[in-house]
Image: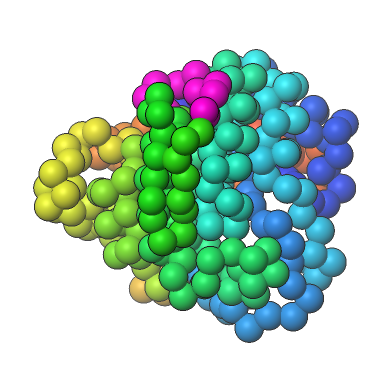
Amino acid sequence: MDFGFGLPVRGPMATPAGIKALTGHGEALGFSYMSIPDHVVIPKNFDSIYPYSKTGAPPFGGDGTFMEQLTFMSYVAGITKTARLVTSVMVVPHRKAVHTAKTIATIDVLSGGRVVVGCGAGWLKEEFEAVDAPPFEQRGKATDEYLQAFKELWTSDAPEFHGEFVDFSNIVFEPKPVQKPHPPLWIGGESPAALRRTAKLGDGWFPIGANPRFPLNTLDKYQAALSRLKQLCGESGRDFNDIALTFWANWQYNKESLRTPEGERHLLSGSSQEVADDLKRMQDLGVETVLFNLVRQDVAASQATMQAFVDNIRPLVD
């Protein structure tokens, strides 16, 4: 099983020195993945509900500071050597499809084939409006169409696509990504729509376990979702075994047991042995990659948390 952690794109560590310190330490400890979140702008006022908290309040601060995801990824690609770089997740309709596909292909080439495209449809309606994205109400349809266009651009010698939101032909799209057939598309989300998108278009499923509406906070709930995904793959003519199973534990890793509303221990929380046992059970279900929230208030505390994970958890799983 491979492990990774999320990088900060805002706050005191989101500086060249901070990012170098975190990524360098992460690679030295053998972490295989580093993820990068996505917002282009944060509206000063909005009514949209953040889906991953009980209150609906988002985790970002009030100043709205966010570095742009793909630019940030290109910087991280230049200062790392081995880690795979994950958009976690990219709000697919926020950027025009052809330009986005070109940017991702460029980073994949320059990184030596280390890009993973975590894909989401988005939740912040007011941000869609600010960046002139397709209508928020059609974000799912637009996301599917963009992903199909990405694949066409990345794999076809004479790419052509005619859809409602994307339309192109008579173009040269080079260089292609290093990865063949293309950088993997990990579909984020836990909803029925996200599972359908995974079965239809995804190379992997990349859910977060802390969605109050579609919780995957126990092994039984996660296994039930896998059964549904397997059914959808069959209906779509896909082999379930071709879907990479990944997981983003975005709550802070610590030694405290979190509890579900039903009083059960929250998946991937608790003692080192409890977390390791969960990981081994997930591995038995086919999960290949798990990302954790290891970043703390400063570089030193974050590096110490990374070290604690490597010292206390990984030996119990390997």
Name the one closer to the observer, 233 or 158. 158
Residue 130 is drawn in which quadrant? bottom right
Point out residue 169 in the picture as x, y percentages from the top left corner.
45, 40
* Colouring scheme applied when the structure was drawn: rainbow
Task: Determine the residue positioned at 73% across, 48% down.
Answer: 68
At a point 83% along the width and 43% down the height, the residue shown is 13
Task: Mark yes or no: residue 258 visible.
Answer: no
Q: Is residue 176 magenta?
A: yes
Q: Closest to the observer: 4 or 204?
A: 204
Query: Which quarter of the rendered picture does the C terminus lie within?
Result: top left
Query: Residue at 53% across / 48% down in the picture?
Result: 97
Please tell me whether residue 34 is drawn above or below residue 278 in the rendered image: above
> Is 13 positioned to the left or the right of 186 in the image?
right
How many tags in the picture? 0
Q: Position of residue 317 (x, y in %)?
A: 41, 28
For residue 152, what is the image quadrant? top left
Q: Residue furthest front?
A: 170
Image: magenta residue range: 172-182
Whether residue 64 is visible, yes or no, is yes
Q: Is residue 283 left or right of residue 253?
A: left
235 inside magenta stretch: no
Question: In the rendered image, which quarter contains the N terminus?
Answer: top left
x, y percentage for residue 195? 30, 56
Whether 50 is drawn above or below 272: the answer is below
Q: Nearer the viewer, residue 196 or 164?
A: 164
Which of the two residues, 279 or 22, is positioned nearer the viewer here? 22
Relative to 239, 243 lies left or right: right
Q: Main secondary structure of the magenta part?
A: loop
Q: Is residue 156 left or right of residue 10?
A: left
Q: Which residue is drawn at the image coordinates 59% and 57% (left, top)? A: 94
Q: Position of residue 294 (x, y in %)?
A: 64, 42
